[in-house]
Image: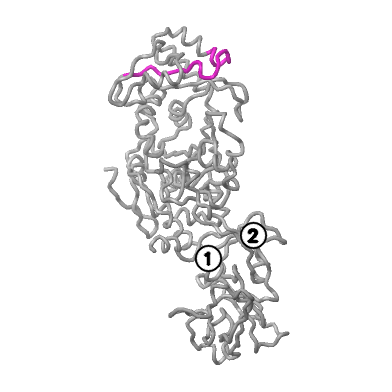
Amino acid sequence: MAEEIFEINEGEEKKSLNFVQQLVAEDLKAGKNGGRLNTRFPPEPNGYLHIGHAKAICMDFGVAEMFGGTCNLRFDDTNPIKEDVEYVESIKEDIKWLGYDWGDRLYYASDYFPKLYDLAVRMIKEGKAYVDDQTSEQIAAQKGTPTTPGTESPYRNRTPEENLDLFERMNAGEFDEGARVLRAKIDMASSNMHFRDPIMYRIIKHPHHRTGDKWKVYPMYDFAHGQSDYFEGVTHSICTLEFVPHRPLYEYFVKELADESYCPRQIEFNRLNLTYTLMSKRKLLQLVKEGLVAGWDDPRMPTICGLRRRGYTPESIKNFIDAIGYTKYEALNDISLLEHAVREDLNKRANRVSAVLDPVKVVITNFPEDKTEMVTIENNPEDPNGGTHEMPFTREIFIEREDFMENPPKKYFRMTPGKEVRLKAGYIVMCTGCKKDADGNIEEIYCEYDPETKSGMPGSMRKVKGTLHWVSAKYCKKATVRLYDRLFMVENPSAETEKDFRELLNPDSLKVTTALIEPYLAETAVAGNKYQFQRIGYFCVDKDSTADNLIFNKTIGLKDSWAKEKAK
């Protein structure tokens, strides 16, 4: 039933539901939880969110929007050692950038520390929990294996009074970290390893970013998560597939509080995995701390803030997530699908501009030296309201060095002696020769233009096979351009076990060059603005740009050159 698809009406459009949406629809139709729908997104504030979290955000907030429910933002702040307010604020910013809003439903697991502690005390008194003095290694060893039952802790049968005394002293700070834990007394022979007396609380003597030094014991995720859902009235706890074996324990703890009238339901979907990408926050943190990238928002990082800085749009990320869908099967998604979604979106919204990344000078010998002529550039042919802008045309211009070849192969339609090309939005020119330095490098190229071939002139409809972009040598401005490539050299760095993941980094993932740009681009460039550099790719103005130092980050090329290289 869960894998079936049915349709709902959205205006005149019919949209198929994924299996999670379908399960939610069925619960609402059945009147469960009084017909309420309340989801939650529960990030740990121990790092910046990445695109995998974006998939969860789109599900948690999206399904609530679809069915008229609500979605909470709750920070799972149960480990103060790794948490920071910086991460809290960045997570809020990322969610809002993606287009979602939690309204007045901002919560923290730490909001529930008193209630969770009281529940633990109650379970101790009822003989459902005990304090264990074993080390973490001893506890792991006595849990057994998936095929052999565990053995009971020698401290499992302490009296409730002794356990309560020890637990209160744990929280009072009498014992060292790791000296004692509180465990649930369930079943050491259970086929589900998570039921073999799981740890509920451990000692952490580190100030919490919200509660300070008030607590010395902190709840484990499996104990805190379901209870937090219950306290908030969450109806559907949607998470990723690694929590499938945790679900029975989630339900076990929740039922210490819930009854038949209301109980949260856990539903799992597949994680987002991308080729040439790592999704481990721990490893991403290592890259940042070791200076292997320029921070969490380095445009090579898969973090939401990194993708934002690179020029990705919320719409492109959502379109990509819609395209790959939600299933119950893990998959490795090709990053080219994400790049395609970005190209599709930026093609509709990015103005076309001229920028030359590897310039060589062209002198149009029959064009007057002191003349400046304006040509009209269409801002975006995909946008009927995009308008136009003017660009100066002069005797001396710059083109890309790779757009000229003295002795070209067949089907070379760029600039070469004796052949004509069109300068974008300008004239048709014919190359008459070039000048070289002592080493044979091209210094200048010489051309003659046909004055009848500008737009609106009698010869403007004359066809030539090649069209080149260019900038005026007199009026162009300089800008710094960062060219980004894949951060990792191998398709699935997570699967590589013989090498440290840092050895798999692509040494050519960032190249910095100075480009020459047209005046319109220099005048309109504001941090976050996105442009299509004609014939090159899509670029975004970096947040560190100034009027005196424009910086552009390459978002993506016009075509998937990576796939072409792989095919060779």
Query: Who is closer to the viewer here, 257 or 472?
Result: 472
**Residue 230 lies in what quarter of the image?**
top left
Which residue is rendered at x = 67% and y = 57% of the image?
Answer: 545
Query: Could you say where residue 303 lies in the image, as x and y percent from the top left?
Result: 52, 47
Q: Is residue 180 magenta?
A: yes
Q: Where in the figure is residue 420, as x and y percent of width and height?
A: 53, 85
- Look at the picture and state if 513 lies above or below 145: below
Which numbered dot is residue 56?
A: none
Residue 389 in sight from this viewpoint: no
Query: Could you tell which of marks 1 and 2 lies nearer the N-terminus?
Result: 1
What residue is rendered at 65% in x and 70% in y? 520
Q: Quadrant of the C terminus?
A: bottom left
Which portion, as a residue range, is magenta? 168-188
Instruction: Judge by depth and name the residue closer to the eye, 511 or 7.
Output: 511
* Inter-mark Cα distance, 1 to 2: 15 Å
User: From this viewpoint, is residue 525 visible?
Assistant: yes
The vertical placement of 155 against 432, above or below, is above
Give the amino acid at mark 1. Answer: Gly
* Quadrant of the snapshot with the N terminus: top left
Question: In this figure, which residue is indicated by the disc labeled 2?
Answer: 551
The kind of residue tagged 2 is Ile
Mark 1 packing: few (<14 Cα in 10 Å), some, or many (20+)?
Answer: some
Q: Secondary structure at mark 1?
A: strand
Question: Residue drawn 53% across and 78% down?
Answer: 405
Count of numbered circles on the image = 2
Residue for badge 1: 537
Q: Is residue 302 magenta?
A: no
